[in-house]
Amino acid sequence: MPFIASGDCRLNVLVEGPEDGLPVILSHHLGGNIACFDAQMPALAHRRVVRFDTRGHGASDAPEGSYSVETLGQDVLAILDALGMERADYVGVSQGGMTGMWLAANHPGRIRRLVLANSTPFIPNKPVWDELAAKARAEGMAGIARSTIESWLSDGFRAGHKDAVERLVAAMAGMAPVGYAGNTSVLRDVDLRAALASISAPTLVIGGAEDGPRGASVPVMTQGVQNGRSVILPNAAHLGYVENPAAFNDALLAHLDAPASAADQPPQ
């Protein structure tokens, strides 16, 4: 796996698929890593797929200090530039979706089509992120990983896929506390509500039928962007790409592989 530099951080990047395939960037949830998209790879075999560990995650570096959604967006731009990709489709889950919104709003020429899965432009409960960052630094990641991941999964998935649950917990538990703390700053500070109206890329918003109050962001994003539509996945809470990959992939391909339209053209 090549490492690509973005400012003070080396990003772990994996590029797969035919060189002439239409490029697509996959960006995982907080506490995830490249492997979280394994179930999407067969469906995207015809694409040039770029997966990466967000800074602070997996094999990417975890610089000290607070990160911002702009920082994460600049990381994606560094990856695109290093790979010689002028434009790409973008699929972001949860925190990864926040990065996608920032990119589509601030660099519309770089994003062709956008998928925002279980994401939100704004989180009102800000103190919790500082509390979690302090807990990670003081106690490590094990307890945070267990409680967070289990709260993000549907009851049925937790009961029937214990090995997969443990892999998700292990991925978050393996984060450096400094990297986790840097990423919690993104969730604390992000506010992309005003940016939604400037997003012209055709946008698919994916929610989970069992995602509870977090699902309230689905209509906000769908109606807030210029060309949005939404799909709600059954048998899924906050990590639908892992919980119900068949339905997720069907929705993904229907959006990414739909015939070209005027909205796909880069802004002039």
Image (cartoon, helix red, strand yellow):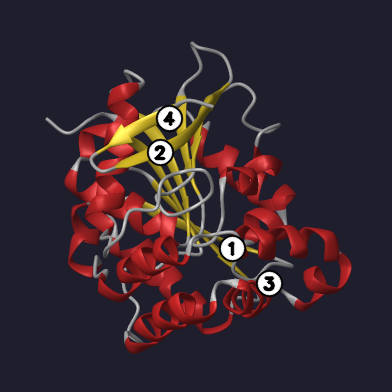
**Image location of residue 265, percent across then percent down:** 26, 29
The mark that comes first in sequence, 2 or 3, is: 2
**Which amino acid is tagged 3?**
Leu
**Image location of residue 21, percent across then percent down:** 51, 17
Helix, strand or loop status at disc 3: loop
- Viewer-nearest of labels 3 and 4? 4
Asked if the residue under mark 4 is in contact with the one under mark 2, i.e. CB atoms within 8 Å, the reply is yes
**Which amino acid is tagged 2?**
Leu
The mark that comes first in sequence, 4 or 1, is: 4
**Image location of residue 9, percent across then percent down:** 32, 43
- The residue wearing badge 4 is 3
State the residue lying farthest toward the left: 268
The picture quadrant where one finds residue 193 is bottom left
Helix, strand or loop status at disc 2: strand
**Which amino acid is tagged 1?**
Met
User: Residue 229's mark?
Assistant: none
What separation in Å lies between label 2 and label 4 (alpha carbons)?
A: 5 Å
- The residue wearing badge 3 is 153
Determine whether 49 is above or below 148 in the image. above
User: Residue 172's mark?
Assistant: 1
Is 234 on the left-hand or right-hand side of 266?
right
User: In the rendered image, which quarter contains the C terminus?
Assistant: top left
